[in-house]
Image: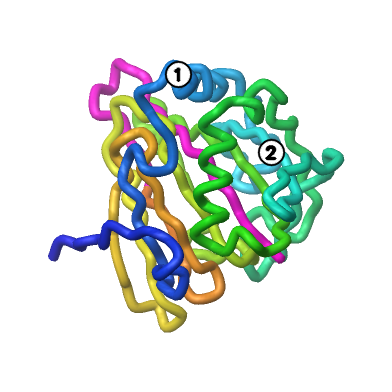
Amino acid sequence: MPITFPDTRPPDDRTRPFLHQPAGWLADVTAPSWADFARSWDDLPVDGHMADGGTYRRRRYGAFRLAGGDLVRLPHAPHFQETDHNPLNGGVERWFDPIAPATVATAPFATIVARTAALVGGEADWRIEAHQFRISAGPGAPGLPTPEGMHRDGRDRVLIVLVGSANLRGGVTTIEDGAGRPLARHRLAAPGEALLLDDARVRHGTSPIERIDPALPAWRDTLVLTFAR
């Protein structure tokens, strides 16, 4: 049965376990600045911390502090998740190349952070972790957006924004409650479309992506922001 998402706006929806934001609400995807922002995904190194040996994921990472409306970049440090939250790659410090300063300086990045903060409570002091992901599928070799399966990230809020994609099937995100009951299934299809999750109340996972045309590349680019107090 199709899921109908509410067209949500802050602050009345902060108590919902997940929100869908249509393309164009978090950032103007028609602006030239969006094209510059999206092109930065073409320069992501391969994730060298995949316990399954996969090379289908590329990424960059950065951490920030948002307090009083000011976003300050923190010194570069490893990313860490407990194994309870990431049974595949958790339990170790993972060093990733930093998100480029030019990417952070783009209007879409600033707008996405500011509008998401308004949704989750912009008056709070947040630690924000930003992840650029590119998942690629080869001929007969699916790419796994969430190789750890259904999971929580171990933060307070999680934002998943589609930046772009090509020649793929799959990539359907499932959201379930703490008892494992599905709440929604949705495929982010348009650049700028997003899902915002209350990480303490829901789990999420995204199905593998596969090539539609086996002769052409297939990829899925996302920006993931996590908010933690």
* Image position, residue 174 (x, y; %): 35, 61
Label 1 secondary element: helix
Q: Which mark is residue 35?
A: 1
Relative to the observer, which residue lies in front, 174 or 18?
Answer: 18
The residue identified by callout 2 is 61
* Image position, residue 187 (x, y; %): 29, 48
Above or below, comparing residue 48 to residue 159 in the picture: above
- For the point 24% across and 29% down, the residue is 212
Image check: 36 left or right of 195?
right
Type of amino acid at the residue the image marks with label 2: Tyr
Type of amino acid at the residue the image marks with label 1: Ala
Relative to the observer, which residue lies in front, 17 or 42?
Answer: 17
Is residue 215 shown in magenta?
yes
Above or below, comparing residue 3 to residue 69 in the picture: below
* Image position, residue 72 (x, y; %): 77, 42
Q: Which of the 4 image quadrants contains residue 50?
A: top right
Image check: 34 left or right of 66?
left
Q: Which of the 4 image quadrants contains residue 3?
A: bottom left
Above or below, comparing residue 115 to residue 53 in the picture: below
- For the point 74% across and 54% down, the residue is 67
The colouring scheme, among rainbow, by chain, secondary structure or one colour, is rainbow
Part of the protein shown in magenta:
208-229
Q: Quadrant of the N terminus?
A: bottom left
Q: Residues within 10 Å of mark 2 (few under 14, many from 20)?
A: many
Decide whether the magenta segment is chiefly helix, strand or loop. strand
Label 2 secondary element: strand
* Image position, residue 99 (x, y; %): 69, 30
Does the residue at mark 1 contact the one at mark 2 (Cβ under 8 Å)? no
